[in-house]
Image (tube, helix red, strand yellow):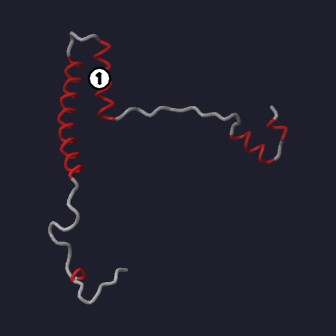
Amino acid sequence: MAKFCKGNKAAKGGARQNAGRPPAPKTVLARLALAELDEEAEKSIQFLVNARDNPEIPWGIRVEAARDLINRRFGKPRQAHDVRVGRTLEELIMHSWGDKDETSK
C-alpha cells in the first residue's frame, strides 16, 4: 500500500483531465497507418469480389478469389496433424504395468 506524506495532495481526488504520459508519436502514427491499411484492405476485398463475379476471368482464379474471401471472413480451417510416436495408449499402459507379453506383439 502506498504511503503519503503529510503535504501530499495526490491522496485526495481522482485523476485530472489530460493527466499521465502523453501518447508517443509512434503510437499516433501507427494508428494513422492502420486507418490507411483499412482503406486499402477494403479495396482489396472489393477486387476479390469483382474477380469472383466476373465471368470473363478463368474459373480457377474465380474459385481462388472466393476461397480467399471465405478465409478472410471466417479464418482458415484447422488442419489435422497426425502425430504418432510409436506406441498406442494401450501399449504404454501395459508397459507401465509390467506386462511384457502384451507389448511384444
What amino acid is at disc 1? Ala
- Regarding mark 1 in the picture, which secondary structure is present there? helix
Q: Identify the residue at horizontal 22%, vertical 28% (top origin).
A: 44
The residue under the point 70% across, 34% down is 86
40, 51: nearer the viewer: 40
Q: Quadrant of residue 3?
A: bottom left
* Residue identifier under label 1: 66
Kindly identify the residue that appears in the image at 18 percent across and 38 percent down. Answer: 36
Residue 74: horizontal and vertical position, in percent? 33, 35
Query: How far from the left and from the top, in percent, is residue 90?
Result: 72, 40
* Picture quadrant of residue 50: top left
x then y, percent, for residue 48: 23, 23
Location of the N terminus (image quadrant): bottom left
Toward the bottom, the furthest residue is 6
| Towards the viewer: 30 or 57 | 30
Residue 47 lies in quadrant = top left
Q: Relative to residue 1, is residue 57 depicted above or below?
A: above
* Label 1 crowd bin: few (<14), some (14–19), many (20+), radius 10 Å: some
